[in-house]
Amino acid sequence: MEYTLENCQKIVDDWINSVGVRYFSELTNTAILMEEVGELARIMAREYGEQSYKENEKDSDLADEMADILFVLMCLANQTGVQLEDAFKKSMLKRTERDKDRHAKNTKLFGNSGDKE
């Protein structure tokens, strides 16, 4: 099976209904999503920021945390009737139109000189 967003939402739904018994409420899943984002933030602060790992955190896995976020987001999408693949396509079109010149004109993105390299 190809892992499109549409197929992944179906895989999540099948898993929830066979292994997970049922979806948690939307509010519970939103809280779980925030918790998972916090776990990602913890790794980012330690890997790319100034914080150091605690002894019990050394086996943290960035990809695993990102996948956990994606799973819970797909749960919420399934529960609320959002087709993430369609929503993502629409979002990319919106960004492309809205930001077509914005980033190219942002001198903060090109270092001190303000010129593209």
Image (cartoon, rainbow, N blue to C red):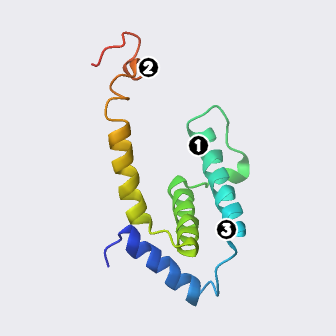
For mark 3, what is the residue?
29
Where residue 86 sits: x, y (%)? 38, 64
Q: Do the residues labelled 3 and 2 touch (CB within 8 Å)?
A: no
Look at the picture and state if 94 lies above or below 35: above
Q: Earlier in the sequence, mark 3 or mark 2?
A: 3
Where residue 106 sits: x, y (%)? 40, 22
Give me the C-alpha separation between circle 1 and circle 3.
22 Å
Q: Which residue is drawn at 67% across and 35% down?
A: 51
Question: Residue 44, labelled with which disc?
Answer: 1
Look at the picture and state if 77 lies above or below 107: below
How packed mark 1 is, by other alpha carbons closer than 10 Å (few <14, some 14-19, many 20 or more), is some
For mark 2, what is the residue?
108
How packed mark 3 is, by other alpha carbons closer than 10 Å (few <14, some 14-19, many 20 or more), is some
For residue 76, what is the image quadrant?
bottom right
Q: Residue at x 54, y 53 (%)?
A: 62
Question: Residue 55, labelled with which disc?
Answer: none
For residue 19, what is the image quadrant?
bottom right
Q: What residue type is labelled 2?
A: Lys
Q: In which quarter of the image is the C terminus?
A: top left
Where residue 61 sits: x, y (%)? 56, 55
Which label sits in the foreground, 2 or 1? 2
Horizontally, residue 55 falls left or right of residue 67, namely right
